[in-house]
Image: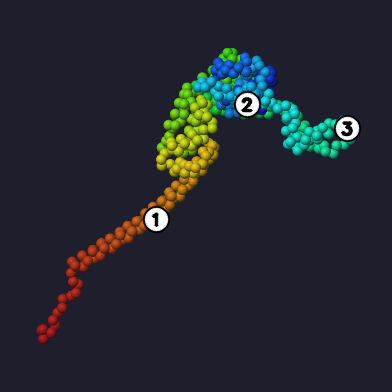
Amino acid sequence: MELTKAGEWIQEANVSLSHAIIVGDVPLNVTDDIIMKVLNTVKVFGRTNIRDRRGDTTGRKLFILMETSTDLESHTVPSEIGIEGEAGPWTVHVVKQLIPDFHSKLLALLRQEGKTLSDVKAFVSDDPSPTPDVNMNLVEAISRLVDKCCQGPTDGPSYRKLRLFSGIKPVPAGEEEYDAWMEQATQMISEWQCSDAIKKQRIVESLKGPAADIVRFLKVSNPLATATDYLTALETAYGTTESGPDLMAKFRHTYQEEREKLSVFLYRLDKLLHRALLKGGIDANGMNKARMEQLIKGALPNDMVALRVRMSHTLQEPPSFSQLMKEVREEEDWVSAREGVRSTAKVATSTTAASGISGLDSLKEEVRELSSQVSRLLSVAKVAPSSDPPRTNIGSDV
């Protein structure tokens, strides 16, 4: 919910404008007893009554609509309330301060259009004479303002529905695991532009079996339960029993495994970090820093991608998850391409060396063969008899 819709909220809850306050930054798991204990410490509220609850735009904190027994003045209402060491501080908003009157809206519109109140007075004057200063753009602007004020919820019949969840194990075909369903539901209730009653209806439509029974039991015990209360009850029944600090300790001791890509390790870290966020183990403002620190700390010491990410973000603000994942995947592709080039060069060098060795061996074999043939010829020449005929002395008989 956005505070700009406070007027619609108090109308739906039927609360007087002068007796309405909205308490913000309240944790999801806070009980009514603690809320009333905190409110009773502020005397200017008189008797208070919890009228409704709604999640903020992040889905991780609550806005609580309170009705007081006294007329409220902004200068007497504290900006924050709480009990030190037990609850709070929570922000306090006086609803009539959040709803600008028609005069303020008109002045803001005139400033936007470059006009003044005198232009409007001339336009609505009873004098039938023409008023050259009147611009039809002003009339159209006022018409747009009226249309915008009368505009209803922007969600239509084609809103994104939640997947089915029953809480049955093993998960039946066509249904969703609890963790995936809860992540989607938490995101959706902060995006749906509709009343809390419609949000509750959409959550109930996605439940069946034991999960639907849990929400039904909650409605019986607390008819004023909000959509966020529904999710809190389901988290109690099916979510992890680990506390926020326990999940953060687990996050701080999560490390990259052998042969695991850094992008896969980053995804594991982020899922664990979001579970800690839902349990109140970490604030949303510190998520980027915690993610980056554990990515560098938990990465393998010989991971080249982690080394490059560490060097590039040493003197920079830690990026968001999507930006960090983009950079990690780009570095992985770059390192993979370099390794591919090295492997190709190594294979080519090995092939050339093998070819050289093969040629040398062939030449040595030929030399050995020639040497063998020469040796055989020499041995044959030594043992063979002379082929010349014996000489005869013819002149001796004369």
Residue at 85% across, 31% down: 125
Looking at the rendered structure, the secondary structure element under dot 2 is loop
Q: Neighbour class for label 2 at 10 Å: few (<14), some, many (≥20)?
A: many
Q: Neighbour class for label 1 at 10 Å: few (<14), some, many (≥20)?
A: few
From this viewpoint, is residue 29 visible?
no
Looking at the rendered structure, the secondary structure element under dot 3 is loop
- Residue 390 percent coordinates (x, y): 16, 76
**Alpha-carbon span between mark 2 and mark 1:** 70 Å
Numbered-mark total: 3
Disc number for residue 127: 3
- Residue 266 percent coordinates (x, y): 48, 36
**Mark 3, mark 1: which one is toward the viewer?**
3
Q: Mark 2: which amino acid?
A: Met
* Most foreground residue, 161 or 113: 113
Disc number for residue 352: 1
* Most foreground residue, 180 or 298: 298
Disc number for residue 74: none
Q: Quadrant of residue 323?
A: top right
* Among the two numbered marks 2 and 3 on one chain, the one whose residue lies closer to the N terminus: 2
Q: In this view, does 183 lie above or below 301?
A: above
**Alpha-carbon span between mark 2 and mark 3:** 46 Å
Q: Mark 3: which amino acid?
A: Asp
**Mark 2, mark 1: which one is toward the viewer?**
2
Residue annotated with mark 2: 1
Residue at 37% across, 54% down: 354
- Residue 68 percent coordinates (x, y): 64, 17
Q: Neighbour class for label 3 at 10 Å: few (<14), some, many (≥20)?
A: few
Q: In which quarter of the image is the C terminus?
A: bottom left
Q: Mark 1: which amino acid?
A: Thr
- Residue 35 percent coordinates (x, y): 57, 18
* Among the two numbered marks 3 and 1 on one chain, the one whose residue lies closer to the N terminus: 3
* Among the two numbered marks 2 and 1 on one chain, the one whose residue lies closer to the N terminus: 2
